[in-house]
Image (spheres, grey):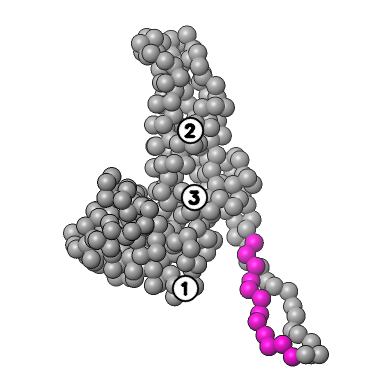
């Protein structure tokens, strides 16, 4: 007997929502999805034109201004990543489930978690390739962790990155140090109390702080991880769950659930990123 409550379109939406929630490097505010509606299938691409800044000049009444066309730089974002998942469900196991819909929800949540982990690692790798961190550093005190965020903030400011909307993704070990610093825990903002009560990542040094296990390895000789900070202007990302199916096995009493996730990303403004190679120890 096939799954009775399976509706592909509804399930695809459920996976997509859970996937967006689970992302860190690929979450809204860390990346932008300006071109999401331009792609829907693997193999597609988007040409992104970045216009040059106009020249600022002195104005002299009754004197011609210097004109000219603003040059633009074209970049291409390819939808060149595709990940599939599948799961077989025997009718005997299905019959023991209380509710097909509840089972589908649990499977979709788990699929979303695994897809998000893979996509996040991909986006983090692109960001890592676009930045050049300083020498590897070892930090072991809460004050050192917070001070490093201040240094990242300074680096972004020196690169004229907008102040509003800055983020930083840290490792669990780094976050653990921040939780011991009063400047982070007692920040006084709306997330301060949440941080104290449940360990949810909050705000620090002008950043929205996110925690992830997908932090890329640093280029140093030790076991450092990249603490990447930036703005959503830096990276654009697009993804779709293009297929969700339930098919009957021809030789078994089994339903096979499967889905396909396609995505792509591009660092279009590497000057809006910075990073530190950090060993927490």
Confirm whether the magenta stretch covers residue 59: yes
Identify residue for label 2: 15
Dot 1 lies on which element?
Answer: loop
| Quadrant occupied by the C terminus | bottom left
Place of residue 234 in the rendered image (x, y in percent of width and height, measured from the top left):
50, 61
Q: How many angstroms separate mark 1 from mark 3 (CA)?
A: 22 Å
Q: Give the residues in magenta.
A: 49-60
Q: Is residue 151 above or below residue 172?
A: below
x 44%, y 23%: residue: 104
Mark 2 or mark 3: name the one nearer the start of the chain: 2
* Proximity of marks 1 and 3: CB atoms separated by less than 8 Å: no
Please tell me which residue is depicted at 34% across the width and 69% down the height of the picture.
150
Picture coordinates of residue 275, whole percent (x, y): 37, 64
Total residue callouts: 3
Q: Which residue is mark 1?
A: 159
Q: Residue at x 30, y 64 (%)?
A: 277
Where 47 sits versus 131, above or below?
A: above
Magenta stretch: helix, strand or loop mostly = loop
Between 233 and 252, the one lying in front of the other is 233
Is 178 inside the magenta-drawn segment?
A: no
Q: Are marks 2 and 3 in contact (CB under 8 Å)?
A: no
Q: Residue at x 49, y 31 (%)?
A: 14
Closer to the eye: label 2 or 3: 3
- Secondary structure of residue under mark 3: loop
Per the image, the residue denoted by label 3 is 28
Q: Earlier in the sequence, mark 1 or mark 2?
A: 2
Answer yes or no: do the residues labelled 1 and 2 have beta carbons within 8 Å? no
Residue 2 in sight here: yes
């Amino acid at each position: 007997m096939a799954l009775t409550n399976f509706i592909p379109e509804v399930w695809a939406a459920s996976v997509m929502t859970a996937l967006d929630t689970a992302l860190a490097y690929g979450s809204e505010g860390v990346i932008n999805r300006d071109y999401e509606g331009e792609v829907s299938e693997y193999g597609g691409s988007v040409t992104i034109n970045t216009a040059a800044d106009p020249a600022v000049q002195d104005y002299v009444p009754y004197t011609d201004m210097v004109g000219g066309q603003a040059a633009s730089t074209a970049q291409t974002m390819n939808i060149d990543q595709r990940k599939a998942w599948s799961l077989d469900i025997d009718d005997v196991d299905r019959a023991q489930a209380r509710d097909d819909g509840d089972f589908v929800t649990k499977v979709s949540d788990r699929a979303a978690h695994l897809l998000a982990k893979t996509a996040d690692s991909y986006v983090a790798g692109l960001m890592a390739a676009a930045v050049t961190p300083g020498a590897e550093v070892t930090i072991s005190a809460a004050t050192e962790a917070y001070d490093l965020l201040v240094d990242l903030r300074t680096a972004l400011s020196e690169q004229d990155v907008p102040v509003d909307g800055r983020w930083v993704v840290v490792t669990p070990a780094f976050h653990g140090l921040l939780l011991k610093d009063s400047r982070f825990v007692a920040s006084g903002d709306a997330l301060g109390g949440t941080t104290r009560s449940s360990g949810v990542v909050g705000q620090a040094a002008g950043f929205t702080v996110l925690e992830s296990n997908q932090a890329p390895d640093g280029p140093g000789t030790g076991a450092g991880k990249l603490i990447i900070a930036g703005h959503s202007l830096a990276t654009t990302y697009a993804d779709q769950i293009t297929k969700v199916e339930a098919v009957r096995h021809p030789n078994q009493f089994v339903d096979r659930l499967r889905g396909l996730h396609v995505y792509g990303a591009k660092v279009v403004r590497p000057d809006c990123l910075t990073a530190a190679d950090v060993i927490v120890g």
